[in-house]
Amino acid sequence: MSNDPFYIDHPVRVRAIQQEMAKDGIDVYIGSRLRTLSFVSDVFCPWRSYVVIPPEGLPTVYTFVIDAARVADETWLDEEHVLGFAPMGGQDQITLVAEKAAESLKGGKGRVGVEAGMSNYLPEGNLTYYEYEAFRAALPDAELVNALDIVDRVSMIKDQGTINRFREASRLVDIGQQAVMDALRAGYKGMTETEIGGLAAYAMRKAGSEWEWSFTGGNEIASGYRTGLAGGACTPASRRALQPGEPLMVDLHAMYRLCLGDHTHNYLLGPATDRQRWHAQNFVDLVALCLKTYKAGVSPSSLADEMMIFCEERGFAEYMVPGFEHGIGMLGDEWRIGRNDGPFPYWTNPDHVYQPNEMVICAIQYACPEEKIGFRYENPILILPDGCEAMSKFPLAIEEI
């Protein structure tokens, strides 16, 4: 057993996947999603990559040949199980991956698990139509079966090393938030959203963050009317200058050993109005109630219903974006929960019952476009039997600068 608090026993993870493969009658698994590659290999794979998981033994990762040496150097797998593909005859990814998968098939026959689906964010990595048809042609006697839920169900309950990595990623985000707060208090005249994002990134990188993961354009900084865009829009930093009398939303991201930090802090750049303070107090009280409500046994729909009753009683329900969380995991492991039924397991499920050691992002969007004001709160939380642990420790408040 390693003394490293961030250690993850990856052979145990692989065996857990193989046990689920056996239950589902899958002879070999071709993983193509970013979340699967992160979960299995424990290394960042920015190029189109695949992992072939046999029924027994070690998986093999295939990535673009220019990056294979770096991936082999950083993963827990040995060099024999990290191979490169190249866009040339006989060395392309379809040929090499299919040949490796065929090694686990008897006479070319059997069931090949693949990952096919859809996602709300760009770099998910589900098989494209071309790839699916190409693998079918390369494995003509095998049956391709959509098995993307295998990794999702194995990865749902987090081990201690993963939990500790999340705590560290959130600690790094808190350092970025403190750097932003200090800079604003020192005087924000002439500062832009991009500058806010940059100084936060510098502080987090100095402390050990590896990346401001880019699903939403790195650090999301919004000021003025951009905080209240309908739907709680994605807000990658713009060149807009900060202005007195406006709200400011600072949504920072960090990464530590593939685990993600994600936390939002909000400001009112004075002079603030009583109406702005009314919006702010509503939001802070709602977030506090939401964090108090999370625990094992709660479902996304039951939590959302309770929160919306509170919003209606206070008279601000019209400003809320429905849904109060989204998924979080190792890089790419982001399954959206929501209040609507999804087309396949683990995409959305309003009746999912949270279990201890699950993780979710408490994500609350408040948007009032007509008043050009809005707030966001995100924080990774660990579900506990009788409550939750908020990973970011930055104080819950809307600061008036």
Image (cartoon, rainbow, N blue to C red):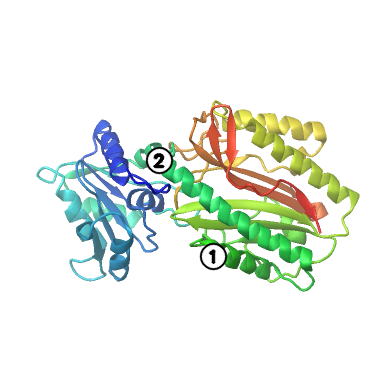
Return the x and y of residue 287 as percentages of the image width and height: 70, 40
Vertical order, 351 against 165 (above or below): above
Tell me the residue at 60%/46% (across/down): 379
Q: Name the residue: 51% across, 52% down.
A: 260
The residue closer to the viewer here, 9 or 288, is 9
Label 1 belongs to which residue?
205
Q: Nearer the viewer, mark 2 or mark 1?
A: 1
Query: Which mark, residue 176?
Result: none
Q: Is residue 138 visible?
A: no
Give how far across and how far down residue 146 sits, in percent. 33, 42
- Quick check: 181 above or below 391? below
The residue furthest bottom is: 190
Q: Quadrant of the N terminus?
A: top left
- Label 2: state its secondary structure: helix
Q: Residue at x 47, y 40 (%)?
A: 347
Residue at screen point 59% across, 55% down: 173
* Residue 69 horizontal/vertical position (percent): 28, 67
Most extreme residue toward the left is: 107
Q: Earlier in the sequence, mark 2 or mark 1?
A: 2
Amino acid type assigned to the residue bearing label 2 in the image: Ser
Q: Residue 228 location in percent, x, y?
A: 74, 54
Q: Is residue 312 visible?
A: yes
| 253 left or right of 307 in image | left
Quadrant containing the C terminus is bottom right
Q: Is 36 on the left-hand or right-hand side of 166?
A: left
- The residue under label 2 is 155
